[in-house]
Amino acid sequence: EVQLVESGGGLVQPGGSLRLSCAASGFIVTYNYVTWVRQAPGKGLEWVSVIYTDGRTYYADSVKGRFTISRDNSKNTVYLQMNNLRAEETAVYYCARARGDGYNHKFFDYWGQGTLVTVSS
Amino acid sequence: DIQMTQSPSTLSASVGDRVTITCRASETINSWLAWYQQKPGRAPKLLIFEASRLETGVPSRLSGSGSGTEFTLTISSLQPDDFATYYCQQYKSYSWTFGQGTKVDIK
């Protein structure tokens, strides 16, 4: 059974850092695309970052240069390092497995339960 | 980035109603479109991919159609479990984007 479990959320001050973890089971992260999607309170879904099977990483413009996605194959876990956080980045952060044909044609078939990141002084 | 616009933002309906949600893309995305359902406090759930292909386990009263820039999600006979928020997502290219959501609530 495919499962993703996020952790690492919490309260952080503006300008601070946080590292989120996404522990996967039922599939191997090395052989799948894994992505992060966030949702601000009462708002819609916003794609944040993805790590491809070949290790390439991509980011939304709003987080480029501040967020870093990575994976630890031995732990079957994907991480999102978030630096210089802003108040408007308060959100539930979900990790999800991406599936689909073609290098970029991916939708998200399994999601974790999410972890709340609150950026506030 | 490709912009996705859903309409309506809110839809009030009764059990048994046929409901349709529209999603428009700012440029052609062929059939690279997915639909998700989200309930309060829960993660989104994949319903449809490639505009019209039902994910395994999704009831057949849900259907998707469209290609290019205009797409629809239809629920043929609304059931109590269908009251939720629905999002479309384009996956023509990374920098994937979602619509703003359509909340289906009880009339």
Image: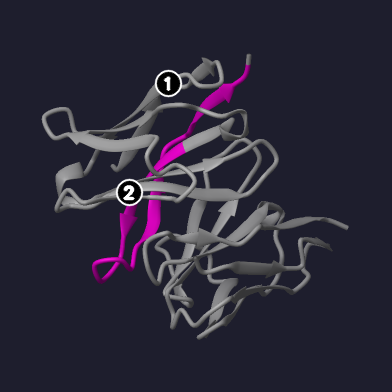
Residue A28 seen in this snapshot: no
Q: Who's the residue at 38% across and 54% down the image?
A: A109
Q: Considering only vertical position in the picture, is A82 above or below B52?
A: above
For the record, the magenta segment spans A94-120
Instruction: Determine the CA span between mark 2 and mark 1.
Output: 19 Å
The first of marks 2 and 1 along the sequence is: 1
Q: Which residue is mark 2?
A: A50
Residue at the extreme right: B107
Circle 1 Cα neighbour tier, 10 Å, few/some/many (<14 / 14–19 / ≥20) = some
**Residue B69, percent across and down?**
56, 82
Kindly state the secondary structure of the residue where label 2 is placed.
strand
Q: Considering only vertical position in the picture, is A92 above or below B81?
A: above
Type of residue at label 1? Ser
Q: Quadrant of residue B24?
A: bottom right
Residue A48 seen in this snapshot: yes
Q: Who's the residue at 44% across and 60% down the image?
A: B96
A100 relative position to B32: left or right: left
Q: Chain of mark 2?
A: A
**Residue A30, percent across and down?**
15, 45
Q: Who's the residue at 70% across and 40% down the image?
A: A42
B8 relative position to A12: left or right: right
Check residue A17 in the rendering and tell me which mark sits there, or answer none: 1
Question: Given contact means CB atoms under 8 Å apart, are the residues at marks 2 and 1 in contact?
Answer: no
